[in-house]
Amino acid sequence: MKIFGSDGFRSKFGEKYMTLEFLIAFAKSISNYHVKYLKNTPVIIGRDTRVTGNIIENLITGILNYNGVNVVSAGIIPTPGLSFSLKDNNYSLGIMITASHDVAQNNGIKLFKSSGVKLDEESEKIIEFDIRSQINNIVKKDNGKTGSNYFEPKLAREYQKCLIDAFPNLNLNESILVDCSYGAFHSIAKKALNNFKSIEFINDMPEGDKINFKCGALEPQNLLELVRNNNFDYGAAFDGDGDRVIFVSNEYGIIETEKLMIIFANYLSGKSSSNILVSTEICNKGLEMNCDILGLKLEQVKVGDRNVINKVLKDQCNIGAEPSGHYFFPKISSTMDGLLTVFHFIKILTNYKGQLSDELNKLVHFNRITKDIPIKNNSSASSLIKDLYDGINPIIDRNTEKLVIRRSMWDPVIRVYYDFKENSNFEKINNHILTYIDGGKN
């Protein structure tokens, strides 16, 4: 059973990874991992606003305490806030209870190291193996220790203060509407941006049953309509746990992450010697072309924010980003951070003095088609994808087109991402894939 994906695990509450049985096995495995590999410092737990988060936190905390592990609760806090708390305090491990951008009925877990970065794959494999052994294996307590737990409200305040202090004397002439998605930034974002009188907020209550529902980063068109109808200049939409943000412009429309990444990179490159950007293999072809034109170097890694973060840190880059609106600024944060990105965005607005739309229009962005195609056997997807590439490569022009085919981590599908500048070959590509699959090759 594969448990950890590229960013923890999640499912509908009461099913799969969110059953009582699985959560008990998970918590016991974390206890075992803590005893064997980590120093004797507390685990920190945070959660977004989902109504099931408190149930999951209490269950995990109780089992960790039962097995002698001390726990500190950060309460409702965005994922980047939990990462910040790890980096600046003496904790051994971070557990973030969130299903990120998923619907309110889902929940999940993200794990962080004491440094504030995502837990590495080798550690996840150790925990995953132990979870499988723990399920249906109720054993007696094997030590005489009992852990403690307490709530630490100052953690969210410290994270908020860090962001404010990182951007002193910041001014804003434009108006911005911020969509908090009923999520973990419902309070911190308002407090951190309180000095900007031209910023207003929507969906800013901790109503976990509404989290991500027809709002937030997955619904930027809704925010764009509100921005235009109410004469705001810009809008920013978080997802449920606050590690991503999508921006919209009254004049320009929905701002592509790949274009904004270039704008950020140009600004940051003047402050260091690095001209390297990091994104994932599914970034838009336009990003590759913009980097070539502007003399920037683009590194592409496999999908997953951990992969982006690791590459940025390894190559000492200024910025990394995923097309979904995850931005990583390593000088301040140890993880993707939506609110930190908003502060950088305000800085960009100040620098461009009303000309941001003009700069965005100068950049290239290719048309994109995406499709999920069912396959019979997910385990053979790797060989299938290789065969598909071999057959499709002669069809496409790499200068004006880009094709990425990936296997889904959880579902029996392959995901197809196709970019084209003007003339689309997608019908040929799609027919080739379907013919190959229907021919019994998979």
Image (spheres, rainbow, N blue to C red):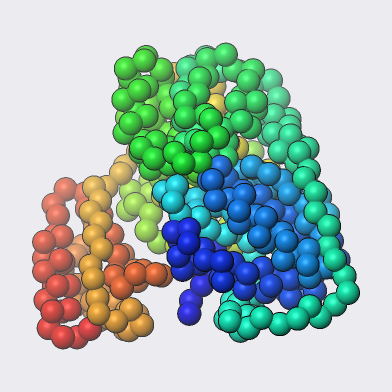
Give the residue drawn at x 55%, y 35%: 206
* Up-down relation of residue 79 to residue 160 (above or below): below
Q: Residue furthest right?
A: 144
Viewer-proximal residue, 232 or 219? 219
Q: Is residue 197 above or below residue 433?
A: above
Residue 64 vertical placement versus 344 (above, below): below
Q: Nearer the viewer, residue 17 or 343?
A: 17
Q: Residue at x 58, y 50 (%)?
A: 53
Tell me if 395 is positioned left or right of 42 in this view: left
Residue 344 in percent (x, y) is at: 57, 33
Does the image show residue 424? yes
Residue 322, image x, y percentages: 46, 52
Residue drawn at x 16%, y 48% as measured from the top left: 422
Looking at the rendered image, the quarter that the C terminus falls into is: bottom left
Observer able to see residue 331: no
Query: What x and y, as percent, mark residue 171?
Result: 60, 18
Near-viewer residue (57 or 266)? 57
Tell me where residue 89 appears, x and y as whole percent.
81, 50
Picture residue at 51% right of the left edge, 72% below the top: 3
Query: Could you tell whether 120 is left or right of 324 in the image?
Result: right
Between 66 and 302, the one lying in front of the other is 66
Q: How many marks?
A: 0
Q: Quadrant of residue 172?
A: top right
Residue 435 sits in quarter:
bottom left
| Up/down of 312 relative to 190, above or below | below
> Is residue 297 shown left or right of residue 428?
right
Q: Quadrant of residue 371?
A: bottom left
